[in-house]
Amino acid sequence: MKSNTKIKYFFRFTLLQTILTWVTIFYFDNFLIGDYKDGFLIISRNLLEDRDRFMSFIPNNFIKIDIMLAIFIFIFLLILYSTKFYSYVNELTFTVDKGFLDEYFSIYLLWSASLLSFLQLFRFTAVSRAYLMLFTLIVPSILVIFRNSQFLSSLLGRNITSENFISFNLEETSIFNELRLLKFRQKISNFEYGSENKFDFIKKNIEEVNKKEQLNLVVINFIDLENLDIDFEKYLLNLNKKILLIGNNPIRFETNFYYRNEQLNNKYLIYINNDIQYGSSYIIKRFLDIVISIFALFLLSPLIVFVSLLIFAKSGVPILIKQTRVGLHGNNFSMYKFRTMKVGSHDERGNLNDLNQKSGPLFKIENDPRIIEGLGFIRKFSIDEIPQFLNVIKGDMSIVGPRPLFPEDSKHYDSVFIRRLNVLPGITGLLQINERNTDDFLIWHKYDVEYIDNWSLYLDLKIIIKTPKSILFRNNTGL
C-alpha cells in the first residue's frame, strides 16, 4: 500500500473511531438504556463480576461502560478494515452493480453480528430491543457515507448516476464499459476516428458535445500510442474533467501531474481527475454554500418581502422568473431572479442587439426600455440575485463561481472559453469584486480562469467577504 494511501486510511480510521464512539455512547445513554436507570447498574455489575472472574489484571477504574464501548468500536473497525469490501472505492475495477445496497448490506451484516455478539458476551442485558434494532441500521449508514465521497456528494446534489461521458474507439462490447468509473455514468456517444489527426478529431467532438450537453468524463481508447502530443496533453489537463486513457502500451507524459495508472486485462489505464469540484472538495464547498445560503435568506427575509410587494404593486405577477442557464459541465438549470423587466423581455433580446454595449455573450443596454419603472435600484444593487440562494441550496449554483450564461451563448465558446463551465456557476466571483462593470467578455474569462486555477475555500471566503462592498460602491452588471 502506498504511503499516501496509508495516511488516508489512518485519518479515516481515526475519524470513524471518534464519530462512531460518540454516536454509540450517546445512543446507548439516551435510547438503549434511556430512562431505565437501573440498567446502568445492572450492566456495570455484570462487567465488574466478569472482571473479577476473567480479567483480574485490569484495574477496576478501567471497567466502565463507555470504555468498553470505545474498545468494541476500535476492534470492530480493525475487523472492518481487514475485509476487502470496506476499502477506498477503486473506480478502475469492474462492477456489475449500479447501486449502494450491496455495499450497505455487507457492512450491515458485519456490524449487526459484531454488535449483538459484544452485547451478549459482556452481558449488556438491560438494553431496549426496539432501539437496538434501529441502531443496527444507523451505524452502517454512517460507514457507507465515509467509505467514499460519492455517496455524500449525491446527498448534497451531485449524483454520479446523473453524470455523462463520451468515449472514443470504445466499442459497446468492450469489457471496459463494465468499469465502475463508466458503469455508474451515462454514455452520450462513442466516436470512431479514422486516418485524420486523431487529436484534432477528439478535441473537436469534446467541444461540440460540451456546448450542448453535460459532460463529466472523457474516455479515449488508444491503440498504439506511447506519447501524447504536448498540446493535446495540456488540452486534456485544462479540461478540468475526468479523463480515462486506455492503451496497449504505457503512456508517457511531458508534464508532471497527479494521475492513477492500472494494468487491467492486458491494457494500460491512466485515470486523470482534474475535476476540481469533486469528492471531498465538493462536499466542503457545498456544506459552506448551504449554511451561508440558509443564513442569508433568513437575514434578508424582510428585504425579500418588501421587494416582492413592490414588484407586485408595480407590475403584478410573476414576482420571480426562471431563466435557463448553463451550469456545471454544461448542465442546464432554471435560475431564479426577482422580475425587474416587463413580461417576455428576454424574447426581445434578439431585436435589441444593435443597442448592446457588451461583447461576446454579454448583453446590457444603458437605460434598457424593458426595465419596469422604479425597479432599477433592484438591479443596481444586485437585489434581484437574492433568489439564487435557492439555486445554491438545490445544488445548481454556488455562492462563488463564474456567472452562468444562457444556452444560446455557447456559440461564443471555444476550447479556451469552455473551461468556465467546469466549476459550479456562482452568485458572485472574482469579476464582481474587481471589474464589475466591464463590457469585455475576455476580462470575464480572465477572472474565471484565475478562479478555476486558484480555487480554495479561503478564496471563496475572501470573495464572499468583499462582495457587499463591491455591491454598495459599484454599479451592477445587470446580467
Image (tube, rainbow, N blue to C red):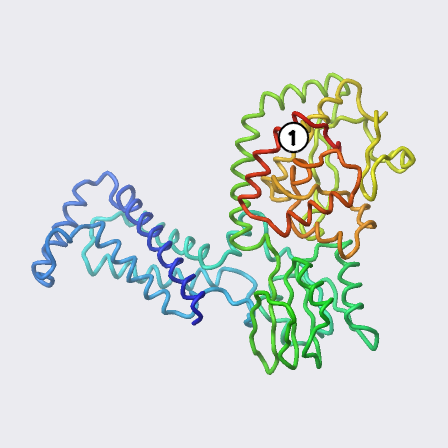
Please state the horizontal and vertical placement of residue 400, each as a whole percent of the image.
62, 41
Residue 97: image quadrant is bottom right
Say what amino acid the circle numbered 1 marks: Ser
Foreground of the two, 474 or 275: 474
Is 273 left or right of 122, judged from the image as shown? right
Which residue is at 22% across, 54% downward? 68
Q: Could you tell whether 139 is left or right of 201 in the image?
A: left
Which image quadrant is residue 366 in?
top right
Q: Nearer the viewer, residue 7 or 38?
A: 7
The residue lying at 61 percent from left, 78 percent from top is: 268
Q: Badge 1, how many Cα within 10 Å: few under 14, some, many 20+?
A: some
Q: Classify mark 1: helix, strand or loop.
A: helix
Image coordinates of residue 371 in percent, x first then y, are 81, 25
Q: Quadrant of residue 179?
A: bottom right
Q: State which quarter of the image contains the C terminus.
A: top right
Q: Position of residue 3 (x, y in %)?
A: 42, 68
Q: Position of residue 174 (x, y in %)?
A: 67, 76
Up the image or down, 60 lies above or below 372; here it is below
Q: Residue at x 72, y 51 (%)?
A: 330
Where does label 1 land, which residue? 470
